[in-house]
Image (cartoon, grey):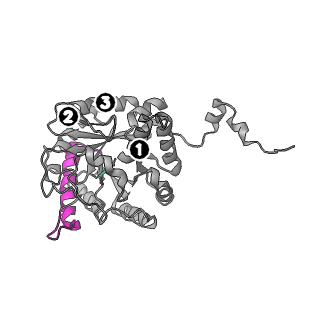
Amino acid sequence: MFPGHRPRRLRVSAAMRRMVAETEIAPRQLVLPMFVKEGATEPVAISSMPGVVQHTRDSLRKAAVEAVQAGVGGIMLFGVPTTRDATGSGGIDPDGVLNAALRDLRSELGDDTVLMSDLCLDEFTDHGHCGVLDADGRVDNDATLALYAEMALAQAEAGAHLLGPSGMMDGQVGVVREALDAAGHIDTGILAYSVKYASAFFGPFREAVESQLTGDRTTYQQDPANVRESLREVALDLQEGADLVMVKPALAYLDVIRAVREVSDVPVAAYQVSGEYAMVEAAAANGWLDRRRVALETLMAIRRAGADLILTYWATEAARWLR
Ligand code: PBG
């Protein structure tokens, strides 16, 4: 008899397919990135990210509660300040928008969710780079590290459970770990943006945080051509004390997620970034793609590649779809 083998038997019904599915997405594995805008009295729409807003401190609290009720595993917070300076001092100021909003969320949510904060200067600098500049206008790695250490303490004191150093400075995980430990914040963890490419997929995020950047980040973020370099970054971050490692962006880097998964014994996160979200939203708005199916398919692909956690702007909605 031909064909002698019939793989379609395992696809005959929804029940059969469900039973044999190899990969699953659970709401607890999704993390919602959120933006809070200093001084805002109404949420402000982000035109390149339909459905995502810059929150007021009040609307942030409400949306965070909704996310937790939907079952998402955590929240990653970004601040949008009204004033910026050369050293990004608004990120270190305990009353700066990000630290103030972290305190709001921690008091609202307690330990019911995992509260994470972006630990980077780019939202707070008037030149938009992830660190301070030297006399020649280059990003000064070691001077930046000292500021990250201060910023880490401010975020830990504001109540973040996990800090996400995302500036791609060499030694950033080590310096943050040391500062936290020296101040007694031994239980504050580090979600290291270990692998972060100089990606054009971050485009809409620049609108979301009103980035002042001109030029690019190619002297500190990675070249999309490389994967061995990513394994080196992961190894260094683990040595320096990372509790989780992250790959970013996600969909164009599934091979990198897989490679990182194979060498790391800590949880691996992947960040489905603003441009990945915007592409699908734009195509769906034109009626060219089925929004929900494509969103879930991309999340499944990222899980299948080996990510334990996914940061995604669809987190709340996807958590509801999955229930
Ligand atoms: C840096 C940071 C960026 C993103 C997360 N953290 C921007 C960048 O590195 O240029 C991008 C996230 C996204 O595009 O969704 N603070």
Residue 155 among magenta residues? yes
Q: Nearer the viewer, mark 2 or mark 3?
A: 2
- Mark found first going from the N terminus, 1 or 3: 3
Q: Which image quadrant is residue 285 in?
A: top left
Earlier-in-chain disc, 1 versus 2 = 2
Q: Is residue 52 visible?
A: yes
Amino acid at circle 1: Met
Amino acid at circle 3: Val
Q: Which residue is mark 3?
A: 65
Contact, mark 2 vs mark 3 (Cβ under 8 Å):
no
Residue type marked 2: Arg
Q: Position of residue 282 (x, y in %)?
A: 40, 39
- Which numbered disc flags the more N-terminal residue, 2 or 3? 2
- Camera-near label (1 vs 2) is 1
Contact (CB < 8 A) between labels 1 and 3? no
Q: Which residue is mark 2?
A: 57
Vertical side of 174 occupied by 73: above or below: above
| x 16%, y 40%: residue | 38
Say left or right for 260 vs 152.
right
C-beta proximity under 8 Å, tags 1 and 2: no
Residue highlighted by disc 1 = 279
Percent from the top left, x then y, of residue 206?
A: 27, 49
- Residues drawn in magenta: 133-161
Q: Quadrant of the N terminus?
A: top right
Give above or below for 118 relative to 171.
Answer: above
Report how far apart the C-alphas of labels 1 and 3 lie in the structure: 27 Å
Position of 60 compared to 12: left or right? left
Image quarter of residue 22: top right
